[in-house]
């Protein structure tokens, strides 16, 4: 279970967890700051723009958004909110330096702006690509497809099992691997996942019928996993032939 959660969170999600927890800590420091701390130049500069409780609410909302979206397939809103708030903080500190309200504000401003740049950089990261050699079933066909069901990756075992070379298979639809009678149901299933972002078949072993290049059918067992990112869903299927199975 923990491995599945870590794969769903990914590098982007782990970074959002850090930003989210930091945001909650900043919110608490603003909401519960003692009077002596509120009188410091940095806090006074913030209070000149908006009450400290308002700043605390902004950080609280940003932190909660980051901690929620770290588990979701789309996290753009969390990254945008965190970046905007951090950059605003940096600008407030820089402006307070030039107005003379916070002579050392340029130090904090530089730190906050650098932090905002770091968050912006992370927002450009893709999730780690699925590596075929780390998936279960070393003797099985392993196929990676995008949200539209177009084959993106194809291992040698898949070529042997279905009769299509890698160059021939990549870029073609998964429906080429199944009899015509199953293709409509397959397409409807992909459409449902694109619509609601959830695959009911993920992680299950599914008995199916495969179609070889020569037109022969054979029984297979498919284990499929769905990987979520800002670019949509990526499917990884591990396929094993079923000895003595019936191709119905």
Image (cartoon, rainbow, N blue to C red):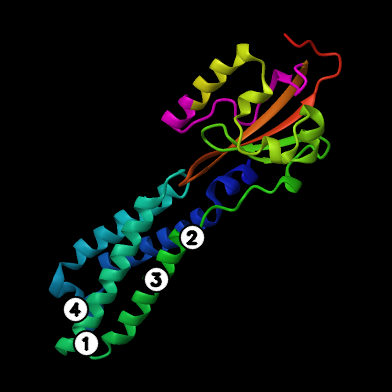
* Callout in the foreground (1, 4): 1
Q: Distance from label 3 to label 1 (Cα)?
A: 21 Å
Depth-wise, is mark 3 or mark 1 nearer the camera?
3
Residues under labels 2 and 1: Cα distance?
Answer: 30 Å
Residue 116 % position (x, y): 37, 69
Estimate how packed mark 1 is, as few (under 14), some (14 to 19) or many (20 or more) residues with alpha carbons within 10 Å: many
Q: Which mark is residue 97?
A: 1
What residue did someone put label 4 on? 45
How far is disc 1 from disc 4 in space, using C-alphas?
9 Å
Examine the structure image and report whether residue 194 is included in the region drawn in magenta: yes
Residue 28 seen anywhere in this rendered image of the structure: no
Please say if 122 is above or below 69.
below
Pick the quarter of the image with the N terminus: top right
Q: Are marks 3 and 1 in contact (CB under 8 Å)?
A: no
Q: Which image quarter holds the C terminus?
A: top right
Q: Secondary structure at mark 1?
A: helix
Q: Position of residue 155 (x, y in %)?
A: 75, 40
Disc assigned to residue 15: 2
- First reached walking from the N terminus: tag 1 or tag 4: 4
Label 2 packing within 10 angstroms: few (<14), some (14-19), many (20+): some
- Marker disc for residue 117: 3
């Amino acid at each position: 279970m923990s491995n599945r959660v870590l794969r769903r969170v990914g590098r982007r999600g782990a970074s959002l967890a850090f930003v989210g927890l930091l945001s909650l800590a900043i919110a608490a420091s603003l909401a519960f700051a003692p009077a002596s701390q509120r009188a410091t130049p940095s806090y006074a500069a913030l209070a000149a723009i908006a009450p400290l409780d308002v700043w605390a609410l902004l950080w609280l909302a940003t932190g909660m958004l980051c901690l929620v979206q770290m588990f979701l397939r789309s996290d753009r809103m969390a990254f945008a909110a965190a970046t905007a708030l951090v950059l605003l903080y940096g600008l407030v500190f820089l402006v307070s330096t030039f107005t003379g309200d916070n002579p050392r504000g340029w130090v904090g401003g530089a730190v906050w702006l650098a932090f905002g740049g770091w968050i912006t950089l992370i927002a450009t990261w893709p999730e780690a690509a699925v590596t075929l050699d780390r998936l279960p079933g070393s003797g099985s066909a392993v196929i990676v497809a995008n949200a539209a069901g177009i084959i993106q990756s194809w291992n040698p075992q898949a070529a042997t099992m279905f009769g299509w070379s890698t160059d021939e298979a990549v870029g073609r639809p998964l429906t080429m691997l199944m009899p015509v009678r199953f293709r409509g149901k397959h397409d409807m299933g992909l459409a449902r996942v694109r619509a609601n972002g959830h695959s009911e078949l993920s992680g299950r072993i599914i008995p199916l019928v495969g179609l070889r290049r020569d037109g022969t059918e054979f029984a297979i067992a498919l284990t499929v996993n769905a990987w979520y990112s800002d670019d949509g869903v990526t499917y990884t299927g591990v396929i094993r032939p079923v000895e003595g199975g019936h191709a119905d």
